[in-house]
Amino acid sequence: MLRMLIRRLFLGAVTVVIVSMIIFTGVEMLPGDACTAFLEREAQGKLLENCREAQGLNRTAAVRYFDWATSAAQGDLGVSANGSKSIAELVGNRLKNSLLLAACALALGVPLAIFLGVVAGLWRDRPVDLTVSTLAIFAMTIPEFVSATVLILVFSVWLGWLPGIVLTSANAPASAFFPEILLPVLVLTMVMTAHILRMVRSSVIEVMAGDYIQMATLKGVPYWRIVFRHALPNALLPAINVVALTIAWLLGGVVVIEVVFNYPGLGRMMIDAISDRDLPVVQAIALIVATVYVGVNLSADILTMIANPRLRTLHMRRG
Amino acid sequence: MNVTTAPQQNTRLNRILTVLRDVVSRPSGAIGLSLVVFHVVLALVSPLIVPYDYKAMNSAMMLTGPETAHWLGTDHLGRDVFTRVLLGGREALLVTGIATPIAVSWGGFVGIFFGLIGGRVDEVLMRVVDAFLSLPWILKMLVLIVTFGTGIEVLIPTLAFFYGIPVIRIARAATHDVVARDFVAASRARGHGRMTIIQRELLPNVLDTLMVEGAMRWSWMLLAFSSLSFLGFGVSPPTPDWGLMIADARGFMSFAPWGVLGPVIALSSLIIGINLTADALAKALGIDRAQKAPV
Amino acid sequence: MSTPLIDIRNISVGFTGKSGETLPVLRNIDLRVGEGESIGIVGESGSGKSTLALAAMGYLKRGLRLLNGAVAFQGQDMFAQSRRELEHIRGGELALIPQNSGQSLTPTLRIGAQLIEALRLHSDVPDAKHTAKAVELLGQVRLPDPDAIMTRFPHELSGGQQQRVAIAMALAGEPHALLLDEPTTGLDVTTQAHILELLRDIARARGMAMVYVSHDLGAIARVCDHVVVMYAGEVVLQGTTRQVLTAPVHPYARGLLASIPKLSDPRLPVALDGTPPAPGGAGAGCAFVDRCALAQDRCRSARPELTPQPGGEAVRCFFPEQADQISLAGTGAEPAKVAAADEPALRLEDLSISYSQPGVFDKILRRETARVMTVDGIEITVEKGETLGLVGESGSGKSTILKAVAGLLPPAGGQISVSGGAPLAREVEYRSADHLRKVQLIFQNPDDSLNPRHTIAEILEQPLKLYFGLGGDALYQRSAEILERVRLGAHYLDRLPSQLSGGEKQRVAIARAFAAEPELVLCDEVTSALDVSVQAAVLDLLNDLKATQGTTYVFVSHDLAVVRALSDRVAVLYQGRLCEIGPSASVYATPSHPYTEVLLDAVLEPDPDTAPTLSADDVVEMSPPARGCPFQRRCPRKIGAICDTDTPPWQQGKDGHAIRCHHAVAELSRLQGVQTKEQVS
């Protein structure tokens, strides 16, 4: 088990290193650099040369990568190109806001998804299942900006119940985002609930058709006891990984929703940074998001290993 | 004359027909497939049937409501919304229609190849795949778009490249299931080469998964394409595009809500159609697609 | 007469076919089981025997429905019970022991928790004593160290242990009747024999009724008083075990018995041609008519009823008095002898194989981990035209050796050479075209070894194109010819494997191997996935091909009787090490290696007068001991410390018979002779 753990951690670290290389290469490919962005129209001749000298931009790519990677590993993400603000500070606020959004969506979506998925799976092909499954297809396929637009139209424009746009500034405390945060949370919840519940549903169906469930029935175990004691602990194991992917998506992939609702999260900051050619910020956000992705997936793998006796002892024997 | 090939093709054709019949016999498949066919046909014929020029602006007729002359009203530049809705999917369908097969083909091949050889090379490749997947799609896309522009010649390879990466994972997993089976061992033991094994033993068995995967990639690509347009990084005006139209009309939503409804319904119906079809196809082929997480 | 415990009256069970018609799986079954009776239900796959057993519990698999009839348990209609009532009866008064216990135990619950659950639901034992009672039950099913087992998860136990746990769980409710659905299928011979003895003892001691469902007449003979033979969803013969196994009056039952290979008969079993009808496929007449040697016009037009016979049995046949025209034994073919001396077709020299590969971390840390050899020190020479049988329990390395010869698994050491003497490359990728063609492998399960997406023509053309470059008409002609040789017509060419029966699929797999015109054919449990009657036909085909082609076989099987029927010589493997090798007649007679003895003693014969001898534990060993004799931990004839420390020497007998044991051959003869006498007295 310990050996497996070390192996996973090692592979996770390798992935993060590869990501950092991809990010660096990707940003290198972009036309211009921090100096052209900073100096804008004056970016030529001596001025540009001096700036590059000062920023250390005329060293070789390998040296600059090494420099960037090592300081990033120590938590120093550098300074943004246009101002001289510390990126760690800039990103910190946005990360906090993104976490708030993600936490609200997860708190609402995960229990809902598991409940609906289990219900749909147990009453497979019945009206409940057909309703839930059809709604899920709609919720997961309609583009986020479409559902967001429709929700704003209904709840904000027509009914006037909820604010359709976030006006709170990025560094405000979490409580200040209510109730503005509700509509974005609703849209996110819809999409993630659909994905998770579909997976839970099919896992429940698969487990309920298994030999040990038939055997439990023939051992005279009462139905609900079978569901809760024999089926669900097995059926919900794969949900761990899907929830992990969802968390990663919530923290890095919800750019569109943040833009639609003007929510000051990481995603919008990333878009702005790309538009402004603020390369150090782009690099920093990309690295943070990627690390979160690797981290939550790693945690999910480890959690699954702990929760599943089959994996647990298998690795123990090997290790 | 080769006597053996004729009936073989029949066997294969029969299978395709059976699957198709199965797809259509399911409500989701029937609805989904008709939506997809409708959109594809529309994209092909729309330039011939639209009532107005999509570029024609009319400052006297801005943001009018639905009326007989303009079924869906006009936009903020006085252009006919109905015309633009009819044309708004062409660019998206063209780009994703070309990029999807490319993505599935290259991702599928790489996935099958590394799934077959396995070992350390495979291990390293999977880390690289992981690394690419860990970056938000929009960041990957934007970096390339900002660098090279938003033309079709940029969008197609970009989408094909990035959407092929998750296919590697799926194809590799499907290949692992097949590689463990004895007919692959039998083929190896007979002395067939790797390419023969991939082509004759693995591909026919992974193809089902790849087809369903392709349908899903297509819908996600459309999603990405219109999201980019919506954010202003995709199709450039005045070319009509649903994502762009929604973005434009959103500003006037409080007093001209019909402007968003047309493109919203058009875009949603296409993506839902593809997904319903993919769902029915997966069921007809006996693959459970809900197990797979979106990447 | 008191009411029977289980009373099944005229039940039919069916499902709805693709075009909406009702297809019956069970047709008009009547069965009564009294208190303390043990009844065996025997039939081949698809005969409906498991469906019948589950129906006795009022349970039908998804998609099946009761068409008519009723099932009563202790007078209560099982299909009319409330859910609560059913939960009370199932596992309480009527308990099931399933086929695959490994998959029937909930993987996330410890054994203890599952046993205690059964006790809580179905026994009067007070809560405080549940743990003690559970441990007691585990002890009763003869599991060593029950306390430790309580804390284990199902996957941490061996197949035999899982089966014992399932039995303990069934006993928790002190049921009146046990239903056993193929409880020993898939277990090793010794384990199987142990489980059957346990079941016999438990049923006797507690006066429990048993319904034992199995395809294995040997197991039925051991535990049942009465036998019901099923065919295509019907009961075709019913009688005492002795009546059914020694003088059956139904043609199918006779054919089935004749198709079972027996240790006592070195000839090939008699094949029962044809396949049973699919559900709904039986016409107006007798379901067996197409395969029956005695069929007459009447059999085609009318369906016979189950009619009582003077001897007390009941039979579904119009002409039971003619049944004895079908011989029970003796008409099987003689095994073909085509071995040519001094011309080896395969030579294994000091072959060793290991599954463990040094890991990345070991490499980084430069750790030298001792590799455990899965197979070690194998020295075998197979003459041209000879059939070598490889036997042993699961984990004996018999299939591993075949894989190494086929080049699918590179050996860790030693050499493999075929005719001509040149050594084979370790991996198949480096072998010459000639070597590749000469060695062909046939797998256990044709469902897995035939690509489901290829037509039979495409399957056969692969070796033909690869080795002979055939194409066009020549390819077609040759494919048809090869199919003919495995007794399938050319019309099979454009079918897919899924359109063939199990036996037909295995024939195609055999055809594919023989299309290469090989010198050496490796058969890996080629009949294990088949029904006995089909198995006999496949064995007969292999024997024929050997006679006409002069092929050399290496034949791997866990079934000692099957190996005996086909092999000239037999090698016995334990934990990847050779124990004994020699002409089959010598290996199957005394003196033998103690392991061979244990294996032979545990074999179940379809004969009510034989009983297996259990001379060793059925413990499953994970890896061979580091030193000494590989069989040291289970050997009933262990001498002492020498067995633990020294590798035993080979002791040569006549005709190349060799035993690897510290006992002298004479001593083994004496010990094994005495043993038999003790048993008789």
Image: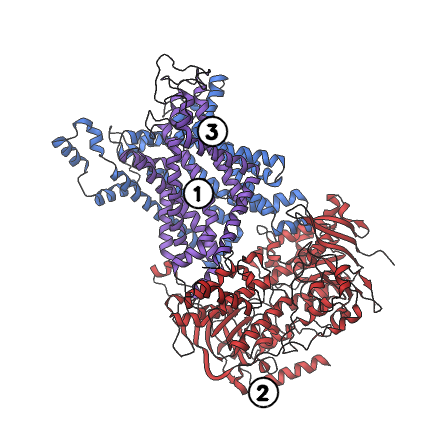
Three-letter residue code for mark 1: Gly
User: Which image quarter: residue C483?
Assistant: bottom right
The colour one sees for chain B in the rendered image is purple
The residue at the far top in this view is B60
Question: How far from the left and from the top, in percent, is residue A36?
Answer: 20, 31
Relative vertical location of residue C69 with respect to residue B189 in this rendering, above or below: above
Q: Which residue appears at 17% of the width and 35% of the height?
A: A52
**Which of the numbered marks, if any, corresponds to residue C666?**
2
Q: Are marks 3 and 1 in contact (CB under 8 Å)?
A: no
Image quadrant in which the C terminus of chain B is located: top left
**Which of the numbered marks, if any, corresponds to residue C33?**
none
Q: Return the residue at label 1.
A: B214
Report the chain holding disc 3: A
Three-letter residue code for mark 2: Ala
Q: Is residue C511 left or right of residue C436?
A: right
The residue at the far right in this view is C1
Q: Give the Cα separation between the discs numbered 3 and 1.
A: 26 Å
Q: Return the residue at label 3.
A: A187
* Secondary structure at numbered mark 3: helix
User: Which image quarter: residue A280?
Assistant: top left
Q: Which residue appears at 22% of the width and 30% of the height?
A: A37
Question: How far from the left and from the top, in percent, is residue C48?
Answer: 69, 57
Relative vertical location of residue C429 with respect to residue A250 in this rendering, above or below: below
* Secondary structure at numbered mark 1: helix
